[in-house]
Image (cartoon, rainbow, N blue to C red):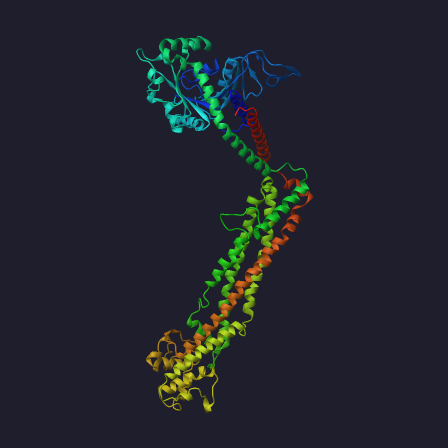
Amino acid sequence: MEALIPVINKLQDVFNTVGADVIHLPQIVVVGTQSSGKSSVLESLVGRDILPRGTGIVTRRPLILQLVHIDSEDCKKTSEENEIKKNGRLYRGIDGEEWGKFLHTKNKTYTDFEDIRQEVVAETERISGNNKGISEEPIHLKIFSPHVVNLTLVDLPGITKLPVGDQPKDIELQIKELIFKYISNPNSIILAVTAANTDMATSEALKVAREVDPDGRRTLAVVTKLDLMDAGTDAMDVLMGRVIPVKLGIIGVVNRSQLDINQKKLVADATRDEYAFLQKRYPSLANRNGTKYLARTLNRLLMHHIRDCLPELKTRINVLAAQYQSLLNSYGEPVDDKSSTLLQLITKFAAEYCHTIEGTAKYIETTELCGGARICYIFHETFGRTLESVDPLGGLTTIDVLTAIRNATGPRPALFVPEVSFELLVKRQVKRLEEPSLRCVELVHEEMQRIIQHCSNYSTQELLRFPKLHDAIVEVVTSLLRKRLPVTNEMVHNLVAIELAYINTKHPDFADACGIMNNNIEEQRRNRMRDLPSAVPRDKSLKGPGGQSLSPTEPLALEGEATKAAAGGSQSGNAGEQTDSGTGNWRGMLKKGEDGPAGDRAMLQYPVPASPQRGHAVNLLDVPVPVSRRLSAREQRDCEVIERLIKSYFLIVRKNIQDSVPKAVMHFLVNHVKDCLQSELVGQLYKAGLLDDLLTESEDMAQRRNEAADMLKALQKASQVIAEIRETHLW
């Protein structure tokens, strides 16, 4: 199981090559307050001085430190890692049993650890500057040595409270966000470092660790500076876990002092002094504390942690590999045959456009209606409901109807309701259907435009590779739709004009409605005749002059005379007045307004012009202005007849328009675009002179394709590494 940690290091190398942080690998994250001894603990584990030291904030970038144990006889690097081609000659590396390598320096090898420290300082200042600021970009360092155990550690900036020098005011928040970024990884082990000469209950390291690991299952505490505690005190209770219990344990260590570092005291000598100190001050705990025990414990914890995390890592790697494979496929392969590629993209777009209209597209929208479904909704819901909401008699008053009737009679009083008035009024109402019909065409045209964007986003992602081709396709389709819009509008306008051109009163539905209406009017007339006084014989009510029988429509014209005869007075003596009382005679209406019964007055009164007086001219052009008065029975009946006829015929026309407009839109706009789209695209775009320009990839597409390909290779290699673990029964 010891070989698990090198496997993780290998996985780390794989992902470092692509600069990706998509996989959270098991690692040990070192956290603590500033100057708590984190860097000293790491140097003790390495056995070398590799980190910058000093007062204040020294670690200003995350340092990912990989310790790789090598056999003692393997004092030189292997040929794969060592061979450096220089000046045409092959060198087999540099003598030495320990060396280091940085990721940012590629194949450069460091055998002098002082150079490693200087490189850490230089790389830190290169990114973070020299003003004590911090950076999230990590430094990757790998140490090969026979004196280390296999570990992967992350050294982070120490927690601080107040900004110093040129540090930003929110330095505490920046550092904590950086720390949480690493310790929030569920595959990490938290190494919480606390100085022994401080109160354990105030440990910031344990506080932040508990925020992400409340159960303490992946937190190990390290107590440093045991030799700096006040005289008369010790850390026995702390190390035994009686103050703050930690599940993975608490290990005490003794670091080199700043004086020891200045005097170049070796880490090996410091380790011997540490052992002697523990034997003297904590003899019962000496074998469970110290740097060597800490290294073995970390190695054991990391191995078990890796073993537990590998199944999840394998699943995660496989999922990411599938995702990046799909992403790489969406980017497409580099174009070799531009002519066939262009024709293929044009054909695919045209097919997807038509499939979206027909409802057979591969990518079906689930959040809203689109394509053919929305066009259907426009036809049967939006347009249909709009037509049904149009009132057949909307904008038409009784005065309008009565005025139209009178204007249609001319200078002669009418015996019947003039048919011209009906045609005039019904055309006015039918004309109101044109506006919603044209609006229907506009809505369908807008949806056809939206389908272009839908196909670009969901159906043909290859077009995103070629922005110029995408723009050209959008322009061609938009132009085609724009050309068909006036043609479709003209057809819809003609549909309404056709209905206005000929009022077909012989329409079967209209004839049936008129028959039912005449029966109702006849029934109403009989009811009125039944209520007439006995002075007028009922059998004469249906007789005309000379005793001739009247047709069913003729009583409508003569009912006024019969009504007046029943009201009293000699027919012969009042013949002139009865003649004047017709609805087509102004004088009769005026007289009726003055002398008629109270029940027949005032709803439509027309003021009588002043009688001409001597010395005053009379203006014959003065027309009586209609004012409110009650309609006579004849006027009311005529208006009702016209209104019922208008409503009946309007409903017939509305039904025709509701049926014919969607058909016209489908034929002249939708189906025409479907049939001509591909030929239009090929004719406009498939030209030799446009190939290079249209198939020019976007600037970042090639870069993204290369990044996706590199990441896919890294994931595939990582999957092979994990497969090797299973084959060697390390899992």
> Is residue 165 in view?
no
Q: Is residue 213 left or right of residue 690?
A: left
Question: Nearest the camera: 400 or 59?
Answer: 59
Q: Residue 186's x, y, as percent? A: 45, 29
Residue under the image location 67 percent in, 17 percent down = 88
> Is residue 713 in view?
yes
Q: Residue 609's x, y, as percent? A: 38, 78
Residue at far front of view: 729
Question: Nearest the camera: 547 or 279?
Answer: 279
Residue under the image location 55 percent in, 63 percent down = 660
Q: Is residue 508 left or right of residue 279?
A: right
Q: Residue 40's x, y, as percent? A: 43, 15
Residue at far left of view: 232
In the image, residue 482 sits, relative to residue 60, either above or below, namely: below
In the image, residue 573 sits, relative to residue 236, either above or below, namely: below
Q: Within the image, what quadrant is residue 249 found in?
A: top left
Question: Nearest the camera: 140 or 591?
Answer: 140
Question: Nearest the camera: 606 or 504?
Answer: 504
Give the tally of numbered discs: 0
Q: Within the image, what quadrant is residue 456 found in?
A: top right
Q: Is residue 590 left or right of residue 4?
A: left
In the image, residue 548 sits, relative to residue 91, either above or below, namely: below
Q: Within the image, what quadrant is residue 207 found in?
A: top left
Q: Residue 235's x, y, as percent? A: 34, 15
Residue under the image location 60 percent in, 37 percent down = 329
